Amino acid sequence: MSSVTLGIFFFVPVVALRDVYGVPFTNNPEVVNAVSSLAVLFACSLLLNSIQPVLSGVAVGAGWQWLVAYVNLGCYYLIGFPLGYVFAFLFDEGIQGMWAGQLAGVGLQTAILIFITLKTNWDYEAIQASSRIQKWGGPTMSPEVNSEENPSLSSDVLA
């Protein structure tokens, strides 16, 4: 949750102050307006990129490196880049279009990783992790954890 909080913490001032970021650097209103419109995309990038790496880390930590790799490839190269190209060149949106396409890819990646994280049976994953640790001679789960006290750790989980 702290990554979401940090994302919002940086998102809000970037959006709120978007019209003044370019002013210290130029007095050209065209450049100031371009910076202002790009600041919104930048703020969205800050928000998504505060969440997505955490979710990727959770998936990699759970041993799903292959899944994260495929989600990355699909979202960036099959969604983000092509959409960015279409928006930038076919719809003549320039850098804003390219950035919007990339944001669509990151947004989809974040949504997929949220879905996977929420649908995962973490009790089962803990049992799997404990068995892997035990295989290498490490400590195991405490004996007081049993299926009667915690129904989510029943033998059904292992099926």
Image (cartoon, rainbow, N blue to C red):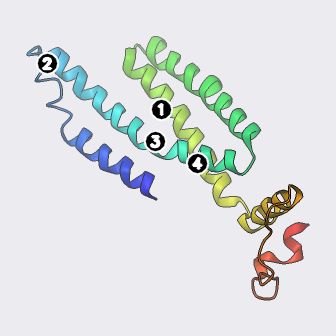
What's the amino acid at mark 2?
Phe
Q: Nearer the viewer, residue 96 or 22?
A: 22
Q: CA distance from mark 2 to mark 3?
A: 27 Å
Asked if the residue at tag 3 contacts the one at tag 1, i.e. Cβ–Cβ closer than 8 Å, the answer is yes
How crowded pointer 3 is (Cα within 10 Å; few <14, some 14-19, many 20+) is rated as many
**Residue highlighted by disc 2:** 25
Q: Is residue 158 left or right of residue 44?
A: right
Disc 1 secondary structure class: helix
How crowded pointer 2 is (Cα within 10 Å; few <14, some 14-19, many 20+) is rated as few
**Residue highlighted by disc 1:** 103
Is residue 111 depicted above or below 93 in this figure?
below
| Position in image of residue 145 (x %, y %) | 77, 81
**Residue highlighted by disc 3:** 48
| Position in image of residue 16 (x %, y %) | 20, 42
What's the amino acid at mark 1?
Leu
Disc 4 secondary structure class: helix
Disc 2 secondary structure class: loop
Q: Quadrant of the C terminus?
A: bottom right
**Residue highlighted by disc 4:** 55
Q: CA distance from mark 4 to mark 3?
A: 11 Å
What's the amino acid at mark 4?
Leu
Is residue 58 depicted above or below 140 in this figure?
above
What's the amino acid at mark 3?
Leu
Disc 3 secondary structure class: helix
**Quarter of the image where one finds residue 75:** top right
Q: Earlier in the sequence, mark 1 or mark 3?
A: 3
Name the residue rendered at 65%, 25% in the picture.
Answer: 78
Name the residue rendered at 80%, 66% in the picture.
Answer: 127
